Amino acid sequence: MSTPLLELRGLSGGYQPIQIFQNVDLTVEQGASIGFFGPNGHGKTTLMKTISGVLEPWRGDVIFEGQRLNRAKARGSRRWRNFNYDVVTPRRMDPKTVARAGLIHVPQGNLLFPEMTVEETLSIAPLVAAERHQSSAHESALHEKVGALFPRLQERRNHKNRFLSGGERQMVSIAAGLLADPKLLILDEPTLGLSPKLRLELCEAIKTIRAAGVPLIVIDQDIGFLTELIDVLYLFDHGSISRRLERAEIPSHDQLMAMLFGEAV
Amino acid sequence: MISLDTILIVTSGGLVLGAIYALMASGLAVVWTTLGIFNFAHGAFIAAGAYIGWQIAHADASGLGLVAGTLGTLLAMFVFGVLFHIALVRPFERRANIVAASVITTLAGATVIENVINLIWGPRSKQIGRMLDGDFSLGPIALSMNDLALVVIVVATLGLVGWFLGATRTGRSMRAVAQNREAAELMGLDVPRLYAAAFGLSAAMAGLAGIFIGSIRFMTPTMGADPLMKALIVVIFGGVARFTSPIYAALIIGMVEAFSTYFVGLYWTPAVLFALMMVVLVLKPAGLFGKHQRTL
């Protein structure tokens, strides 16, 4: 069997001093995509932020293409609240290492860089992949693909991010993620709070990205949309994975709700 | 009656002051906007730059000339700024109280720098001396060649820094980190290194300002205290919405100071400047050219 693309082993984390999720184990096989579904406020976003290293994992490992992205040693206790542990202990995980390995996280409601233009934002996005492939031809091919995917951004290229609509900002955010040449792309609620028309447009773009062979981890509240994209669905509540469903087993929205919250009255 | 000549002389004096303030304030603003902290050692950086420049350039010391002195100072101050950041600011990078903690550490750093300067070069005042001799006149405008060179170099330097921040990938990355640290981290940008680079750039700009001040005034270990205060006024007065905001503000402050010194008097000028700052802040709390948030 080939090495899995991503493996989480007993991952736990949260915001000091509150633990948000515990003992998450999961595997993303090469070329596969997975989805997360579950109620708001149960730790999906925190888990994603931990996978990408923005938050430090407390315990457990994140293994990407057979390489552990975090330090082996578990995070020590941080009992003295007012002690600067940052000076005496190295970070368990560095977001830079994660992104450079090719695991790219497009965060929920990304505000991007408000005073930078779309063009400026997209110009720095490929920097992270520059070490992996040094040809500029590859980069311009990526730029072309992304341009074809989001033609609207071409019109907006000289606009500052803060003047974009929520949908356009989400497009810039995903476009920046793609320009980083991801081996695995995390999309955290990519269609949250968008108008129905923009939502459709963005969903189509994400399906195109999937069809082009980019593996995804998608969090979304629309089970129909998820089913079209992914191979395995994880139900996530109270800070841990409660069920793992193969694509064929994914039930309808109502049945899912019943699974998560018990039978409806 | 005020003659046209007087106005021109005062204006050119204001221009030179404005140019130096612009260099100091935009250097201060680079750190402020990128890291979100105020570097109280910026004035001490100015002094350190002036003394390093003197050491390399002056005939009484190494005597390698002003060009070598300037380039050597830029390089030395960049490295110094990076080390200063690593030692005194980076430890608090992930702490919520970084602003308060860095006030103390940068103030402490400033004191140490001033004392080390005193230890190495002594308290006696020094002067780097003019960059160029002679005068320049164009119609009714008359400037010394030194002042003209100073203004030209400041304009070129600020243009270069503006181009760096706007057009190069490293400069854009620096602005990105300033505007949204988490999004920049997720893009794989090396945040600690960009912070250090911002500090280094800021220190190099302070060093250049130090050489300019050393060329027109006497240098003492505490020579940076007054420029720091002026740079603070400029940055707060103009806001930091764009890289150019403190530059315009510096010109205005320089002109106000020159005219106020001539017409109101030297002793009242600081009061005039602070009164102006109060009025601007009451009417536009984010600064004259300010927006709602700090950015670059």
Image: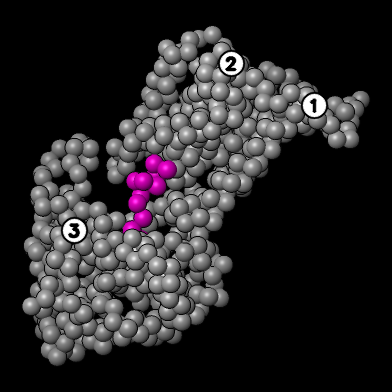
Residue located at (55% from left, 27% from top): B69
**Residue labelled with disc 1:** B135
Please indicate whether residue B145 sits to the left or right of residue B223 in the image: right
Q: Which one is in front in this view, the residue at disc 2 or the one at disc 1? A: 2
Q: Name the secondary structure under disc 3.
A: loop
Q: Earlier in the sequence, mark 2 or mark 1?
A: 2
Relative to B4, say whether B244 is above or below. Answer: below
Amino acid type, mark 1: Asp
Quarter location, residue A136: bottom left
- Magenta stretch: give its range: B187-197
Relative to B151, say whether B262 is above or below. Answer: above
Along the viewing direction, whichever of A111 and B5 lies nearer the viewer? B5
Q: Position of residue B66 (x, y in %)?
A: 60, 26
Label 2 to label 1, Cα distance in Å?
23 Å
Quarter location, residue B131: top right
Relative to B242, say whether B13 is above or below. Answer: above
Residue located at (51% from left, 26% from top): B49
Colour pattern of the rendering: one colour
Label 1 to label 3, Cα distance in Å?
64 Å
**Main SS of the magenta segment?**
helix
Q: Residues within 10 Å of mark 1 (few under 14, many from 20)?
A: few
Residue A101 in view of the camera: yes
Q: Which one is in front in this view, the residue at disc 1 or the one at disc 3? A: 1
**Residue labelled with disc 3:** A69
Q: Position of residue A35 (x, y in %)?
A: 21, 78
Which residue sits furthest front?
A: B64
Amino acid type, mark 2: Ala
Q: Which mark is residue B59?
A: 2
Please indicate whether residue A116 sits to the left or right of residue A68 in the image: right
Amino acid type, mark 3: Leu
Query: Marks 3 and 1: in contact by CB < 8 Å?
Result: no
Q: Position of residue B293 (x, y in %)?
A: 49, 50
